[in-house]
Structure formats: structure tokens, C-alpha cells
Image (tube, helix red, strand yellow):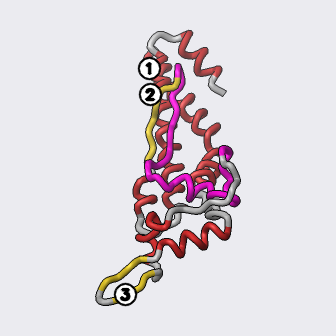
Amino acid sequence: DTASLQDMARNYKGAGPIIQQEMTRELTRLAIQVRNEAVKLAPVDTGRLRSSIAYELAPRGQDLIARIGTNVKYAKAVEYGTGLLSEAPDSSHTRHWPPGPALDGWAGRHGFSVTSGGETTNLGWIVAEIIGRRGGLKPRPYLRPAFEKVKPKVADAIEKARLRAFMKIARSS
């Protein structure tokens, strides 16, 4: 409950920046916890997805929000799955046939390749065919469970920020 913080900010000169500083401190701490948990839970092949998980604080109107996520193109497919197996709210839930060449790198790293005349050919199309016949990729959530694990700590974090702000305001009065 942030109502007491708003009352404090209205009633004490200079309280606003102190409250904002303490809330930012706690929000940052929570965002780091979610990010760290997501990194632990993210599936690993090359490590690219894991290493790309980041957080940022951003204003939204009068509020400050934390965004935790990644800019890797395939992250949504990993988190929610694809096609018939997708858990994404915006999914069409139709069979997913990924393009074979997009899977050539993965195929090569996992033994789906042939060597002929000294030249190796990765067989991403075989992996794409398997995914398509199954209907898509199954979800491997990492961000949603990370958030759910940290979510119960939010009320305590707000209370800590409120108490620290109150103590700082009391000392400065």
C-alpha cells in the first residue's frame, strides 16, 4: 500500500525525493532478483539467451516500473512455446513450421549434420520438420516463474522503503 507514502510526501517538505529514492532502491533490488532468477531458469544452448536477460527502470506516468527481459528474437518462443503448444496470449494456436535454415546452427551443434567430400551440411530442415509435425515448440518458461518467485517479496519491499524514507524524513525535520 503506497497511500501512506503519498500522505508523507504531501505533508513533509522534501519528502518526495526521499520517498522516490527509497522506492527506486527497492524496485531495483527486486528487478535484480527477478533477472537473476530468470538467468538461472533460462535454458542454455549457446548462452546467448541467458546473457541477454537484463532489467531497466522506466517511468510510466507518475509511476516507476521495472522491465525485465531480453532482446533475443527467439526469447518469446522459448518462454511461451510456439504453434499448437504455445501458452502466449496472442498465439494463433496453429501448427508451427519454422524455416529449416534458421535451425542450421542448432542442428550442427546437436549432431544433425552430414559430411561429404570434406564439406559439412547442417540439417536444420530435419529439425524444422520434427517441430512442425509436433505442432510447435513446447514452452520452457524462465521469466514468468522468476517473477512469480519474487512477487511475494513486493509488499515487504514497499514497507522497507516506507520505513527508510520515514526515518530519513524524521531525521531531517
The residue to which callout 2 is attached is: 21
Marks 1/2 in contact by CB < 8 Å: the verdict is yes
Mark 1–mark 3 Cα distance, whole angstroms, equals 65 Å
- Relative to 120, is 133 above or below? above
Amino acid at dot 1: Pro
User: Which residue, as the protein is rendered here, is positioned at the far bottom?
Assistant: 117
User: Which residue, as the protein is rendered here, is positioned at the far left?
Assistant: 118
Q: Secondary structure at mark 1?
A: helix
Q: Residues within 10 Å of mark 3 (few under 14, many from 20)?
A: few
Q: Earlier in the sequence, mark 3 or mark 2?
A: 2
Mark 3–mark 2 Cα distance, whole angstroms, equals 60 Å
Residue at x 52%, y 65% (from the top left corner): 43
Amino acid at dot 3: Thr
Q: Look at the image and give the residue range highlighted in magenta.
A: 61-90
Q: Secondary structure at mark 2?
A: helix
Residue 80: within the magenta? yes
Amino acid at dot 2: Gln
Q: Estimate the x, y position of residue 2 in percent, counting from the top left.
A: 62, 25
168 sits left or right of 163 in the view:
left
Q: Estimate the x, y position of residue 129 in percent, counting from the top left.
A: 58, 71
Q: Residues within 10 Å of mark 1 (few under 14, many from 20)?
A: few
Q: Secondary structure at mark 3?
A: strand
The residue to which callout 3 is attached is: 115
Mark 1–mark 2 Cα distance, whole angstroms, equals 6 Å
- Relative to 12, is 62 above or below? below
The residue to which callout 1 is attached is: 17
- Relative to 151, is 114 above or below? below
Which quadrant would residue 77 be assigned to in this image? bottom right
